[in-house]
Image (cartoon, helix red, strand yellow):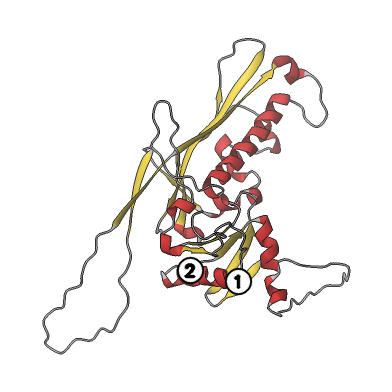
Amino acid sequence: MTQYTSFDLVGVKENVSNVITNLTPRKTPFQNAIGNEKVTQPLFQWQEDSLRAAGANAAVEGADASFATLEPTVMRNNYTQIFQEAIEVSDRADVVATYGRKREFAYQMAKTAAQVKRDREFVLVGQAGDKASGSKTVASTMAGVQMQLDSSTVIYTGASDGSKPLDEAHLVTALKTSFNNGAEPSRIMVTPDNSVVLAGFAAAAGRYRTIQGKDAKTIVNVVNLYVSPFGEQKVEINRFLKAGNTFIYEPDQWTNVTLRPWAKKDLAKTGDATKAQLLGEFSLKHKNFKASAMVVEAASGF
């Protein structure tokens, strides 16, 4: 992209896709934590495989070969989803002097970039939306994290009305499930409400935090790292994570999928205004559906 916009004011030329990627990474932690992959079709597929259980393996000298029971791979797939937002700014508004910004169009485009990135994070982790191929009149949709988990890795707290909150026993069970499946979970993603619950685990168990520093006025009440029998997990808060969900994952097991990267499309000028559309087409891949886990504050369902 060669057009000069407000994104270039820092002195380094970047295209729209890079700008959005670098925009407020802490506010979209999941998509910023995982890898990226390019695809060439709206429907993309991948194969999932696993190793058999380990067991005693000893052969008598001279014995005939013992053949393994071979299992086929599992074919997985997902669809890409189009994200877009368009803006229209009158030409007068774009030249009128305003406080806090030089050009209204550039300001509104930057705001739109932040908004569509948040939309993408919400689709990834904030809803139990399933994949759909779409049609001429219906948008195609991607399967988010909830729909890319094996049922055995979803741990329910038990209350049918969702009133039973996250507790440490269920969290450890989910970590154990992921570990037993061969994964090495390194992240625990929590909602804002459950970040408070997790912070209270230490007090409830009679554990203590050592707070060092000269400033005696500072009170620290946060858990950034949870050390379990199954390793160390970084705790990250996500305001878009679906309420009642606690997500346990390893970033290497997930991939952002791109069919069309973010791009600004200048729309036809039909009068005294400037129009543009920000658009990209993306999806999500979980390399192995048993590699992650979820604690759900209900008896069943997300």
Residue 199 drawn at (x, y percent): 70, 67
Q: Quadrant of residue 186?
A: bottom right
Q: Residue furthest front?
A: 160
**Res 290 seen here:** no
Vertical relation: 199 (above or below) 3:
below
Residue 92 drawn at (x, y percent): 74, 15
Which one is in front, 236 or 196? 196
Q: Is residue 198 left or right of residue 219?
A: left
**The residue tagged with tag 2: helix, strand or loop?**
loop
Q: Residue at x 82, y 68 (%)?
A: 219
Residue 38 drawn at (x, y percent): 42, 43
**Res 64 seen here:** yes
Q: Amino acid at mark 1?
A: Glu
Give the mark, 2 or 1, whose residue is nearer the N terminus: 1
Disc sitting over residue 168 in the figure: 1
Which one is in front, 274 or 294? 294
Disc sitting over residue 111 in the figure: none
Q: Can you tell which of label 2 and label 1 is closer to the viewer?
A: 1
Residue 294 drawn at (x, y percent): 51, 61
Disc sitting over residue 184 in the figure: 2
